[in-house]
Image (cartoon, helix red, strand yellow):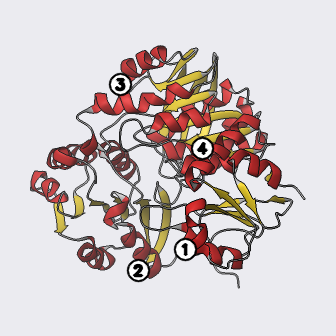
Amino acid sequence: MSWLWTSADLIAALNGRPVGHMPQGITGIAIDSRSLGKGDAFFAIKGDRVDGHDYAGLAIANGAGLLVVSEAKLPALGRLIAPMIVVDDVLEAMVRLGCAARDRSAAKIIAVTGSVGKTTTKEMLRHVLEPLGSVHASVASFNNHWGVPLTLCRMPESTEYGVFEIGMNHPDEIRPLVKMVRPHVAIVTSVAAAHLGNFRDLKEIAAAKAEIFDGLVENGHAILNRDNDSFKQLEKAAIDAGASHIHSFGSSAKADFRMVEFANGPDGAVLWASIDNRTFEIPMGAPGRHVAENALAVLGAAFLVGADLERVAASLATLQPEKGRGERHRLAIGSGYLTLIDESYNANPASMRAAIALLRDTPPQEGGRRIAILGDMLEMGEFSADVHAKLSGPLTEAGITDVWLAGPDMAHLRDALTEGCNVEYRETVAHLQAFALEAVSAGDVVMIKSSKGTGCGKIVADLLDKYPAFSDTEPAN
């Protein structure tokens, strides 16, 4: 049996007290009793809404090998018979275990942050490195105060490449997380107007993103977006943090990892990239200039950790957009099909512009329309009215005349759009949902973009439920 952690190592790293008959080791770590595997350790974390201790019995019933519980909660667990490791605070103990996982690892570690594209970049890194060795990467967007230590705890000792996403909503969130991760390479994909409600301006956002440099190992590498307006600020922050090597990516002639040329298409693209004085022609499985820009950072990081660039570049051809982040569907409707672009996972002004560009570059079928279905961008604070209204510019420049909107903040965009636009506005996503299901038609390209909390993903789900996947192959006789 290959253990993720032996019980002895687990107890030592957690600084815990064993209770009951300990198994020899554990095969995994879970914080959700519904998703744990047989033999996993269940960490009973107390969150804002749910206390894992309330689900300890269910975790045992679902096959947990042992429980990690708080000393203060032990009496409340009553007569529950199970091997336990008792600690002062479960989340703090998980942080200690995450640090121990990092200490024992010889993997090359890459950390990613940024206002836009960090999850896509993390998944791109996972995708291109997996053919080259064992990769351990964050699940979904496990990038916060519990997601990062959980990801570290789950990293097998044999891992060759570790890829960690680190996010933030406020200052001083990234610093403690990156000091656990201690990356060899730290990437900042971009600085843009995300979480503006918690910051005064882009300079404050850039300063918060720059905290990622504080965790770089000795002789570590920082990778920055040369095309971003915050480049100089980030470069200075990296120098001040003692980053040994600073690199840049982008279309700028000064970029170390440079976009020489880019050709976009409806279902893919071609990127010509200059890396280490070599030019690579790279077919991209996922369309969009913003994806290609992040691919430059991926190529640069792979080069810096010694990966085979030829194989990394070849893997980008099989890259596919993820659910909610540009995933595409062809749905049968009438005598043809519509193209659905699912961008519903999250939104800020920069990612909105990128999604509008994707819609612009995707041609409709004969008689079809390019339709932008947009919901509110959340966490914009006092800037909300202005940033929503300013989306009229990218829509107009892209020639998108069919714009369907939902939410109180999108009323500002409705008012800013010209009379030449076919605008449908509803106060709630539910009302727009009902309209959209009946108003789409064959030939249309429909792009849905919003912050996750608005519920625009329900429009995606309903379209997928109502209209079957389109196949252009003839049925067999």
User: Of circles 1 and 2, which is in front?
Assistant: 1
Q: Where does label 1 land, which residue?
A: 54
Mark closest to the chain's N terminus, 2 or 3: 3
Left or right: residue 125 versus residue 357 is: right
User: Of circles 3 and 1, which is in front?
Assistant: 1
Which is more toward the observer, 243 or 440?
Answer: 243
Tell me the amino acid under the disc marked 3: Ser
Kindly check if marks 1 and 4 are in contact, taking CB atoms under 8 A apart as contact.
no
- Within 10 Å of disc 3 (Cα), the crowding (few <14, some 14-19, many 20+) is some
Instruction: Using the numbered discs, state the Cα–Cα distance from disc 3 to disc 4 in whole angstroms.
Output: 23 Å
Tell me the amino acid under the disc marked 2: Gly
- Within 10 Å of disc 2 (Cα), the crowding (few <14, some 14-19, many 20+) is few
Kindly check if marks 3 and 4 are in contact, taking CB atoms under 8 A apart as contact.
no
Which is more toward the observer, 270 or 243?
Answer: 243
Q: Where does label 4 land, which residue?
A: 124
Find numbered disc 3 in the image and state the secondary structure of the residue it sits on. Answer: loop
Mark closest to the chain's N terminus, 3 or 4: 4
Left or right: residue 228 versus residue 265 is: left
Tell me the amino acid under the disc marked 1: Asp
Task: Note whether residue 171 is visible.
Answer: yes
Q: Quadrant of residue 289?
A: top left
Which is more toward the observer, 171 or 357?
Answer: 171
Mark closest to the chain's N terminus, 1 or 4: 1
Q: Where does label 2 land, which residue?
A: 334
Q: Quadrant of the N terminus?
A: bottom right
| The label number, if any, that marks residue 230 in the structure image | 3
User: Of circles 4 and 2, which is in front?
Assistant: 4
